[in-house]
Image: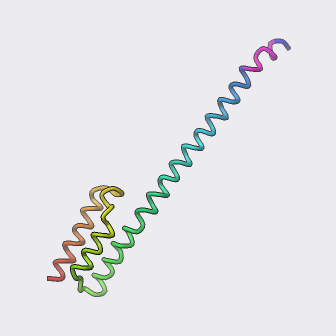
Amino acid sequence: MENIIENAPTFFNLIIAAAVAFIAYQQYMLAKFSTRRELYNRRIPIFKSVMKYISKVIIDTDINKDDGFQLLKETSETNFLFEPDVKNFIDELYKKGIELNN
């Protein structure tokens, strides 16, 4: 019985440490999810802008420079939110749209 009483603080410290570790892990997962959600919320307008530009090219086949400038303006944060290949794709869309106009 004395052995149990002597080891009780150690046992409670282990329980507290496990609880703290569990809470820290939950906070980590929450921060990770929040970051992904914020990134999604910033990426979706760029996606919609690109889709709007592509649909305008397909439907109208008449792209003017204002449409191209609008695309570049709406996708100006692409460098920060996507890999370089996405920025290159958007630049290629812009160039092809301008070529269609000429």
Query: Magenta stretch: dominant SS?
Result: helix
Query: In the image, residue 79 lies at what x, y percent?
Result: 30, 57
Identify the residue at the far left of this view. Answer: 102
Tell me where residue 101 appears, x and y as whole percent: 18, 83
The image quarter containing residue 88 is: bottom left
Quarter of the picture holding the N terminus:
top right
Identity of the residue drawn at 42% across and 62% down: 42
Tell me if residue 13 comes above or below residue 5 in the rendering.
below
Q: Is residue 33 above or below residue 50?
A: above
Question: What's the magenta region?
Answer: 3-9
In the figure, is residue 30 to the left or right of 91?
A: right
Residue at point 25% right, 79% down? 66
Magenta stretch encompasses residue 8:
yes
* Residue most extreme to the top: 2
Q: Residue at x 22, y 82 (%)?
A: 64
Q: Position of residue 48 (x, y in %)?
A: 39, 72
Visual colour scheme? rainbow
